[in-house]
Image (spheres, helix red, strand yellow):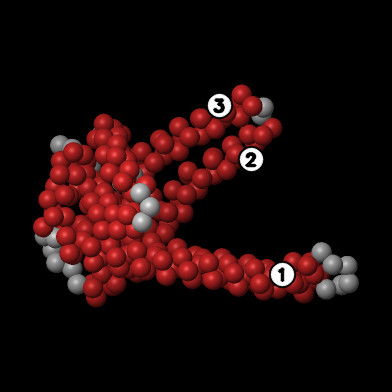
Amino acid sequence: MASAVQAFSDAFSSYRALVVEYAVYSVILIIASMALSFFAGLCLGIFGIVSLGSVANVFASDGSMGIAAIGLGVSLIALFLALLAVLWVSSGLHGAYLSTLNGFISRRNQSLGAFFLCVPKFATSITLISIICGVLVGAPLLFVMAIAPSLGEIFSILALLLVLIYVAAAAFLLVFAMPAAVVDGKGPISAIKVSAIASLRNPAQVIIYFAIAFALAIPALVPLFNLLYIPLFYMPLSMSALLRLYRTAH
């Protein structure tokens, strides 16, 4: 039977026994994610510089609009592809990280080479899961935020409350999507379905998991301390507990 408390307890025992291994792969993930964030920021900066002239010419009346529009379109496509590549690699890294933690649960050793070889294995499926979940969660939120000013104060507050409830429900149903993709090799749609079914079958344990994870996140509010606390303790513990809960919940 699934138990969130037991999942955290087992995760902590494993973490204490393999603290160096957990720390190494967590640091690798953080450093790689920071590098990807820098690359994404660089792409946005380059796009901003390159597109300034094109945007100005699009609205000009000297006949240069056609070429400028083509240049702007090419720049947008290049930016989209670059950001998609960042998302793909980032998704693969998170998949490899979860796979490593799942290996620790199964008492399997992991090498750095095997870790990076796992990146392309999970990149596409987790990218699609991220996009689908982002649309499911973000689209209603953006829609309500867009129409809220025209609803009046009372109705806009009610609409925002409803959409926040929707976002919480979506997070509840989607919590096991990535574990399903990594542990059982499920495709994006199948992983989301498995996550929803497992969450609905174990609602109390999923809520308890979120409550414990939230309580453990409180120390991360301390500046500077959180730079060590999150990657070296909170992230490996909470992700390992989630994998353990998934393995007993579905």
Please report the residue visible at 57 percent of the width from the left and 28 percent of the height from the top: 157
Q: Measure the alpha-carbon separation of dots 1 and 2.
A: 27 Å
Q: Is residue 130 above or below residue 71?
A: above
Q: Nearer the viewer, residue 145 or 21?
A: 21
Q: Position of residue 17 (x, y in %)?
A: 11, 57
- First reached walking from the N terminus: tag 1 or tag 2: 1
**What is the number of the mark on residue 28?**
none
How many C-alpha atoms fall within 10 Å of the one at disc 1: few (<14), some, or many (≥20)?
A: few
Q: Residues within 10 Å of mark 3 (few under 14, many from 20)?
A: few
Is residue 227 visible to the viewer in this orientation of the structure? yes
Secondary structure under the numbered disc 3 in the rendered image:
helix
Look at 54% across and 44% down and name the residue there.
139
Spot occupied by residue 123 in the image (x, y as percentages of width and height): 37, 64
Task: Give the residue type at disc 2.
Answer: Ala
Q: Is residue 181 left or right of residue 167?
A: left
40 or 106, which is in the foreground? 40
**Residue at x 84%, y 67% (from the top left corner):** 60
Q: In what element is the residue under mark 1?
A: helix
The answer to whether the residues at label 1 and label 2 have Cβ atoms under 8 Å apart is: no
Determine whether 186 is above or below 196 in the image.
below
For disc 2, the marked residue is 146
Mark 2: few/some/many CA within 10 Å (<14, 14-19, 20+): few
Residue 143 falls in image quadrant? top right
Q: Name the residue rendered at 51%, 30% in the picture.
A: 161
Q: What residue is disc 3 on?
A: 158
Point out which mark residue 52 bears. Answer: 1
Quarter of the view holding residue 130: bottom left
Q: Amino acid at mark 3?
A: Leu
Vertical order, 34 against 235 (above or below): below
